[in-house]
């Protein structure tokens, strides 16, 4: 019998092995805990600010709050440019669940058009998914209500309320106010160059023309900031902090709405312009260019078809004729020519010439015709202005010469910017020998000077230049700058008048020369032989003026003007400048009608109507109007 051998167990060794394994596990646990604690320390203490910022970025949204644009009023406090609330439907693409399905639903709910849907998908291609895209602009109150009720079905979609510029009088003030429109790439570059990127963050619109552009810095205001807490869909839960924006300054203009609308009505369908200016302050009371257009089209976003129609129109409604229209001044500048002839002692108050109906340069066979083919007979300087005798001024201009005409007329503002607070302006042309040499590579001829003597030839002016020059005459040489802006709103809501530039004066050898020229202008409207006396019969005020009939095309020496045989665009321009009262001028007006014919028969009655409106309906006659107050 085999006897089994029992194994002997080593309990001590097993105990040591267990202890070693336990120690290893314990150390491993300690290391794991250490790593965990270290990681917690890193996350909770060392990197607390970093991860808090990242967390807040998901939870807190910082929004720029654009400022309200300043309002624009006429001198009586009637609003000309305001901000109206509008509602837009917008979407943030990366917040949606099923974009295509949502769009289909909205097409039924809000009757989205095919064009709106197409435009949305086109915008989506070029817009980052976290940026809002507007689907429909200018929602009605009914549409806002319908969407609000169903908003829970459309994650990522929301109604955005904002203020939009609105011009309540439409095309009546377009060439004064201009308009605002959406900021484009060119605008962004200019903003960046000026270092104003932060100021325009959150702003979609900027002044493009007129007062809106010229005073953009005042009207825009300063943006504010809002910190809001949002949910996972980007919806605002609550506002954490708010820094209010600073609204733009309100502007009060010198424009009088009653006179402005009257001027527009008087122009009717005529192409042309009317300006009315306060002779004491330079305040522009009316500034109308016709035809015009509705500036609200540009605020909403003008269609290509509408814009092309404006661009291609032969009437050129986009041109501000008051500051950009260039016309030969014709006989409206004869009072200034008379002043120059007197001041250079080419003539005296008693100088008399005989006008047979023509004049010619000594040694030349060419005859320069007077508008009155049989002539005016014997005329002095006063009668020459009253009856607009061309022959008298042909002779005076020839004797004075272009080298003295140019610098003298520049003092009246011809060939220079008027100083009007609108950026859209041209200097027109006040010709000289040097100008013609540079422009045409030709010398100056005596015949050029003769034409300049009656405001024809190379000489062109803008209506605002004519207005300023007439005001200088009325003020006997005191130069005044025309201004549209009257005053700017302050922090307490009061309007502070704009500071006026220092005035300069044109000096003549004898101040009596002013009286001679002005007396001639008074005769134009108030004496029997005056070219416009019929238009100003029985006025309640005294008035002085000067008519002008500007040739658009050159006529042959013996050719007779017959408007019926000419294309409309080749017919004469009718012009008239006037101021009243004669003794103490308050109002200066300029009327320019394109291709309308004679200035006395067509433009003078309109000038009379403007003066009547002002003195009989806007202010009492002979009462000073402080448009700058």
Image (cartoon, rainbow, N blue to C red):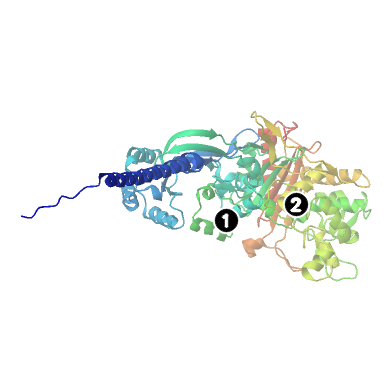
Residue at the outermost front position: 1
User: In screen coordinates, is 284 left or right of 311?
Assistant: right
Q: Residue furthest top?
A: 492
Question: Does residue 605 appear anywhere in the picture?
Answer: no
Is tag 1's residue or tag 2's residue first in the polypeptide sequence? 1
Q: Residue at x 67, y 52 (%)?
A: 424
112 over 539 or under it: above or below: below
Judge by depth and name the residue closer to the eye, 335 or 381.
335
- Check the image and name the residue furthest to the left: 1
Percent position of residue 584, x then y: 80, 36
Nearest-to-viewer mark from 1 and 2: 1
Report whether residue 345 is seen: yes
Residue 41 at x, y = what percent?
A: 46, 40
Contact flag, marks 1 and 2 (Cβ < 8 Å): no
Q: Secondary structure at mark 2?
A: loop
Of 239 and 49, which appears nearest the observer? 49
Label 1 vs label 2: CA separation? 29 Å
96 sits to left or right of 187: left
Which residue has dot 1 on it?
Answer: 185
- Number of the label disc, if any, that sits on residue 563: none
Residue receiving disc 2:
417
Per the image, label 1 sits on a secondary structure element best described as helix
Residue drawn at x 90%, y 56% as measured from the top left: 353
Assess disc 1: are there few (<14), some (14-19) or many (≥20) residues with their C-alpha within 10 Å of its C-alpha: few
Residue 68 quadrant: top right
On the rendered image, what quadrant is the C terminus found in?
A: top right
Pointer 2: residues within 10 angstroms few (<14), some, or many (20+)?
A: some
Residue 461 in the image, given as x and y percentages of width and height: 74, 55
Name the residue located 94 percent from the left edge and 47 percent from the top edge: 509
388 or 72, which is in the foreground?
A: 72
């Amino acid at each position: 019998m085999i006897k089994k051998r029992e194994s002997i167990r080593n309990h001590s060794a097993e105990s040591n092995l267990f202890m070693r394994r336990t120690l290893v596990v314990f150390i491993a646990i300690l290391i794991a805990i250490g790593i965990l604690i270290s990681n917690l320390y890193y996350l909770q203490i060392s990197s607390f600010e970093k991860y808090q910022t990242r967390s807040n970025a998901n939870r807190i949204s910082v929004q720029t709050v654009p400022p309200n644009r300043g309002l624009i009023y006429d001198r009586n406090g009637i609003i000309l440019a305001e901000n109206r609330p509008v509602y837009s439907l917008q979407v943030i693409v990366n917040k949606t669940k099923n974009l295509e399905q949502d769009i289909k639903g909205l097409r039924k709910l809000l009757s989205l058009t095919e064009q709106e849907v197409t435009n949305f998908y086109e915008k989506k291609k070029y817009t980052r998914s976290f940026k809002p895209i507007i689907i429909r602009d200018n929602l009605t109150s009914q549409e806002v209500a319908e969407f609000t009720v169903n908003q829970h079905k459309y994650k990522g979609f929301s109604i955005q309320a904002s203020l939009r510029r609105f011009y309540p009088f439409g095309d009546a003030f377009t060439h004064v106010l201009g308009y605002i429109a959406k900021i484009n790439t060119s605008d962004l570059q200019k903003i960046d160059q000026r270092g104003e990127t932060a100021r325009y963050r959150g702003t979609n619109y900027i002044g493009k023309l007129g007062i809106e552009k010229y005073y953009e810095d005042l009207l825009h205001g300063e943006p504010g900031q809002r910190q809001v807490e949002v949910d996972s869909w980007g919806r605002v839960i609550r506002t954490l902090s708010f820094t209010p924006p600073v609204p733009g300054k309100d502007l009060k203009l010198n424009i009088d709405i009653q006179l402005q609308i009257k001027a527009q009505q008087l122009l009717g369908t005529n192409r042309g312009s009317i300006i009315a200016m306060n002779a004491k302050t330079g305040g522009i009371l009316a500034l109308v260019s016709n035809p015009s257009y509705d500036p609200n089209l540009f605020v909403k976003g003008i269609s290509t078809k509408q814009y092309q129609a404006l661009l291609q129109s032969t009437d050129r409604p986009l041109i501000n004729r008051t500051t950009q229209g260039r016309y030969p001044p014709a006989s409206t500048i004869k009072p200034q020519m008379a002043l120059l002839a007197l001041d250079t002692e080419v003539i005296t108050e008693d100088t008399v010439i005989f006008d047979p109906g023509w004049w010619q340069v000594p040694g030349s066979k060419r005859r320069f015709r007077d508008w009155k083919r049989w002539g005016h007979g014997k005329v002095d300087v006063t009668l020459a202005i009253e009856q607009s005798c061309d022959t008298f001024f042909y002779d005076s201009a020839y004797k004075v010469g272009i080298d003295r005409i140019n610098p003298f007329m520049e003092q009246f503002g011809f060939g220079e910017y008027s100083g009007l607070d609108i950026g859209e302006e041209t200097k027109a042309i006040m010709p000289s020998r040097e100008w013609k040499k540079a422009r045409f590579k030709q010398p100056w001829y005596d015949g050029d000077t003769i034409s300049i003597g009656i405001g024809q030839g190379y000489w062109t002016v803008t209506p605002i230049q004519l207005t300023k020059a007439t005001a200088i005459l009325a003020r006997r040489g005191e130069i005044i700058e025309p201004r549209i802006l009257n005053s700017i709103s302050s922090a307490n809501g009061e309007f502070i008048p704009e500071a006026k530039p220092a005035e300069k004066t044109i000096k003549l050898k004898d101040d009596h020369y002013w009286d001679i020229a002005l007396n001639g202008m008074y005769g134009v409207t108030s004496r029997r032989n005056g070219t416009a006396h019929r238009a100003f019969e029985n006025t309640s005020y005294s008035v002085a003026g000067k008519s002008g009939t500007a040739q658009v095309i050159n006529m042959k020496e013996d050719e007779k003007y017959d408007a019926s045989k000419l294309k409309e665009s080749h017919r004469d321009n009718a012009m008239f400048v006037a101021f009243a009262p004669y003794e103490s001028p308050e109002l200066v007006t300029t009327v320019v009608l394109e291709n309308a014919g004679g200035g006395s028969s067509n433009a003078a009655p309109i000038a009379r109507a403007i003066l009547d409106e002002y003195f009989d309906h806007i202010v009492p006659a002979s009462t000073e109007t402080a448009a700058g107050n």
